[in-house]
Structures are given as C-alpha cells and as structure tokens.
Image (tube, grey):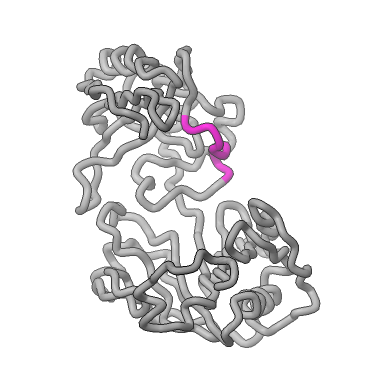
Amino acid sequence: MNRLLRRTQAALVPLTSWPDGPGPAEVPLLADGMNPILRVADDWRLPRHETRTEVMARCGVLPDPIYNWPALVLTEAEPLPGALAPWTASAFQRIPPQFPISRFTALAWFEDDAHANLRRVADNLTASLGPTLVGQRWNTVVAAWRSGLAEVSLTAWPPEWQSQGLQNPSEDRDPRLRTACHVTLTTGFSLPLSAREREWVTSSVPLAFEGDVGTARMAQAGRLAPGETELEYVRDPEDLVDDRQRTLGLSADGEALIVVSDQLFVMPRTDILLLEVIRMTPAKGGGGSSLHAHCCTHATGADNQSVFLAQHSDPDGMTALGQELGERLGCLVEVSRYYPDC
C-alpha cells in the first residue's frame, strides 16, 4: 500500500479556480485491461463484489464513527493515510440491498489546512492514477479521477470560504472535520442488459410528445454512474442508445417502458405500479409539470422506486402523455392537484 499511496507532489497541477470546478482526469485502462480505479478499490479491500445484504449480514448497521447516522462501517478495508475513521458505505433504507455497494466514503486529515489535506490525498493517489487538476468549485476545493464510470473524487471545505455562523454538530465534536478531505470512490456498477431487455431496447419506438425527457442539464446515458437507489431499473446501455438520447418509448411488444435520460432505464410493464403527473402553477418558480413512474422495489425503506420520465413548462403539459402511457401499459395514472411552484 505504501507503493500505491506514495507521494508524487511534483506531478500535480497548481490550484486553479473554475466556477464549476475542474473536470476529473480520465485514466486509461491498465495493460491487463483492468479498470485502474477498481484496482485501487481492490487494493483498499473495499467489498465491491459483495451485495449490500451480504455486507450488512457480516458488518451490521452501526452509527457512523464521525456523523453518528446509520452506516456500514468497513473495518476490514485498508484505511487511507490520515484516515479519521474506517471506510463507510450508506445504510440508507431506500437503497435496494440485492446489488453490490457502489459508493464508498472516507475522511483524511493531516493538519489544520483544507487545501493541504486535499493535496496530501491527491499526491498519494497520483502514484496509481496519474496527475489531476486541483481547483475550486464554488466554496470547495476539489480533485477527481475517472475511468469508465468508476471515479475517485476529493472534496474539502476551506473554512475561509464558508458562510459564517453556521453550526455543524459533527464539527463541534471533532474540529478536524472543518478541514478534512472527503474521499468518495464510486465503482460505476450497473446491471448488464439481459437478452430480453436488449430486445426491448433495440425494438423500442420513441414516443412523440411536447416536453423534455429527463432534466435540462442531465448527462447522456452511459456517461455517469447511476445512483445507488436507481440500480433496480438502470442498465448498462452498451452502445445501443447513442442515437436514442433523451427519448421515452415502449418496446415493440408493449411489455416494457424504455427511458433514455441520464441513464438507460428499462421498466417491465408488470413492475410499474402507477404513473404520476405532478402539476405546478407559477409562483416563485415558473411552474410546469412532470411525469414519474412508480415501480416495484426491494428496498426496505420505500414503497416504490420513482423514476423521473419527462417534464413540460405547462402545468398541464404532461397529463395527456401520462394518460396515453397508462392506457398502453395498463397501469393506474394519478394526476395531482395544482401546487404552487414555491
């Protein structure tokens, strides 16, 4: 591990300011075809191959050693140099437990200087992942590496960049948190398409409607790792949706709803519990409407998994699409009352 985490400070680029922060360094695959970030995860003994259920059975759900909220505390993993506590993973009950953990977090602290702490961690990682840009993103200093959908990101909150008078009980308990470097490793896990799902995707016919699929600033499907709460219906898009970005449609046999937004969502008709149209009238915000699919889930803390489908600037703009999809999928459609967009 000392080899993996040795310091190579000269390779780093000096701090530069960006409104949205520097992008992650793109790291190529290793000579043996292995993803270098996943290799780092394995060297750190992060349990990325086990399901959340298996890890919970072995480790239990404990209070986070720093923040006291429920967490999976991974004492068997290799701690970072300067670690304030073991690696942790979320115990959020809306995460379906049948999939591997795909997001791990840790904190590192060396001295009472947020910039220095982040640079120390970045220096260490440069040995295995190469150099990256260190820069400002609004009130934080950041650095990151990406390979495929896997990513390591570093974030620190310099106290001099923060609003004064804010209180954080965790920082009161341990003042080192004010300048610690937050480390997040995301594996990029998603399920591959089954043969039937691949047929659904390739045969799907996009629906024509007024409005937008997904959200205005979303990334293209296959560009970013899915969130852990999304894993039941997200699939690896492979190279099947490059010409179907920002589309919503039905498979040729009518048995699945296919959405290509920031992820590829494949929802079997039998898993869709209901469609919901939410209507917002102009107030502080401009108003509009959105369409959501509520699907079956194995998450213990949720009645369903909600997938954002589409939106329109008109409060009634999604109603017709929701009703059409409800008829074609044979599921309930709920249209909300009008809420002020406050």
Q: Which is nearer the eye, 270 or 164? A: 164
Indicate whether 292 appears above or below 205.
Answer: below
Q: Position of residue 235 (x, y in %)?
A: 44, 41
Highlighted range, magenta:
214-223
In the image, 52 versus 164, the foreground residue is: 164
Residue in the picture at 45% in, 23% down: 248
**Which residue occupies 38% across, 59% down?**
100
Note whether residue 28 is visible: no
Residue 52 image offset from top left, x and y in percent: 32, 62
Residue beneath the point at 45% across and 32% down: 198
Q: Residue at x 31, y 26 (%)?
A: 278
User: How far from the left and from the top, in percent, is residue 56?
Assistant: 27, 69
* Residue 291 in the image, given as x and y percentages of width and height: 35, 26
Q: Is residue 123 left or right of residue 228?
A: right
The answer to whether 203 is drawn above or below residue 57 in the figure is above
Q: Is residue 138 visible?
A: yes
Work out which quarter of the rendered image holds the C terminus and state it.
top left
The image quadrant that residue 126 belongs to is bottom right
Q: How many marks on residues?
A: 0
In the image shown, does 114 or 210 lie closer to the viewer? Answer: 114
Q: Is residue 137 magenta?
A: no
| Residue 311 position (above or below residue 308) | above
Q: Residue furthest front?
A: 165
Residue 124 as seen in the image, left or right of residue 156: right
Determine the main secondary structure of the stretch shown in magenta. Answer: loop
Q: Is residue 296 left or right of residue 86?
A: left
Q: Quadrant of the N terminus?
A: bottom right
Q: Residue furthest right?
A: 10
Any magenta on residue 218?
A: yes
